[in-house]
Amino acid sequence: MAAAAPGALGALRAGRVRLVAACCARLGPAAWARDAAPRRGYSSEVKTEDELRVRHLEEENRGADLKERAKMHSSEVGPFVSKIRAVINDIANLPVPTIAAIDGLALGGGLELALACDIRVAASSAKMGLVETKLAIIPGGGGTQRLPRAIGMSLAKELIFSARVLDGQEAKAVGLVSHVLEQNQEGDAAYRKALDLAREFLPQGPVAMRVAKLAINQGMEVDLVTGLAIEEACYAQTISTKDRLEGLLAFKEKRPPRYKGE
């Protein structure tokens, strides 16, 4: 993974499901390792070399390659799905905001990848769904856990039990995506919207963005009292930063802040 210049737009080509990661973070190839353990705790520090501002991972991800899967021995399937789950978990645990842009098909694993992102946007013509029950299996990349958290348990069960495929407008109506766009001639309406959102995120304090994501993600898994304690611990990480002082100084001097992620 090559480094992107601070403030620039960088790309990693891997299509129709794209991942846009925004804001400054210390992030290197280890963060994408297939067998990396999910990161826990209240610290947002990532001890690697490269600095990330905006990247996109573009992938023709309609789900598993069924022809390839059919050739697998049953003993190979579990480890194969475990690797997929690990990659998707790595994306969910990225310490920067992530946006999934769905411009085409996102079925099965493609939608599970999108569900691991913080925000999802889709073209109205996009098609998405967890269709695994049609194949007598269940979603194995986190879909049974992340879809209910995104749209509620009852509706998630209905979509998984029926293997229903939604278009962009239907996905927006159930809360699966935050924005839906009419597709353009280039076929990248959702991607363009994702970049617009990323540009809104870029000027903000990098440390604040990382710990805000951490506080939200971990707080949603616990009761309110514990969540408030998590927020307090995350807020404390911003107090001693140079960026916080720079933000106050920039406000006083009526100029844009120059954050360095420190």
Image (spheres, helix red, strand yellow):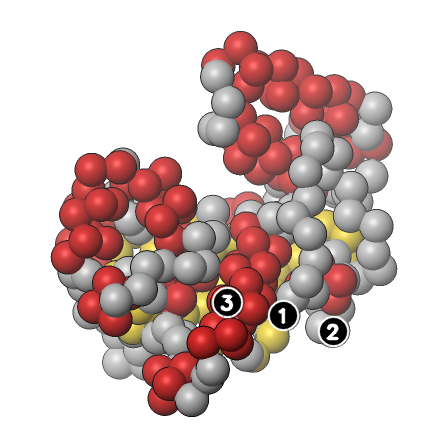
Q: What residue type is labelled 1?
A: Gly
Determine whether the residue tagged by mark 1 lies in a helix, strand or loop: loop
Determine whether the residue tagged by mark 3 lies in a helix, strand or loop: helix
Residue wearing tag 3: 78
Q: Residue at x 48, y 17 (%)?
A: 223
Residue under the point 36% across and 38% down:
149
Report the amino acid beneath label 3: Gly
Q: Is residue 164 left or right of residue 201?
A: left
Q: How far apart are marks 1 and 2 (CA)?
A: 9 Å
How much space separates mark 1 and mark 3, taking CA atoms? 34 Å
Q: Using residue 118 as the reference point, say whether residue 168 is left or right of it.
A: left
Residue 187, given in percent of the width and then of the height, sits at 31, 78
Mark 2 residue element: loop
Residue 218 appears in the rendering: yes
Which mark, by number, is residue 161?
Answer: none
Q: Mark 1–mark 2 contact, CB under 8 Å? A: yes
Q: Which of 195 and 75 is in front in this view?
A: 75
Q: Residue 70: x and y, percent?
A: 37, 85
CA separation in Å, label 2 and label 3? 32 Å
Left or right of 191 on screen, residue 21: right
Mark 1 vs mark 2: in front: 2
User: Which residue was labeled with disc 1?
Assistant: 10
Sequence-wise first label, 1 or 2: 2
Q: Which residue is drawn at 63% across and 21% down?
A: 230
Res 2 label: 2
Q: Residue at x 56, y 68 (%)?
A: 79
Amino acid at dot 2: Ala
- Is residue 31 shown above or below 105? above
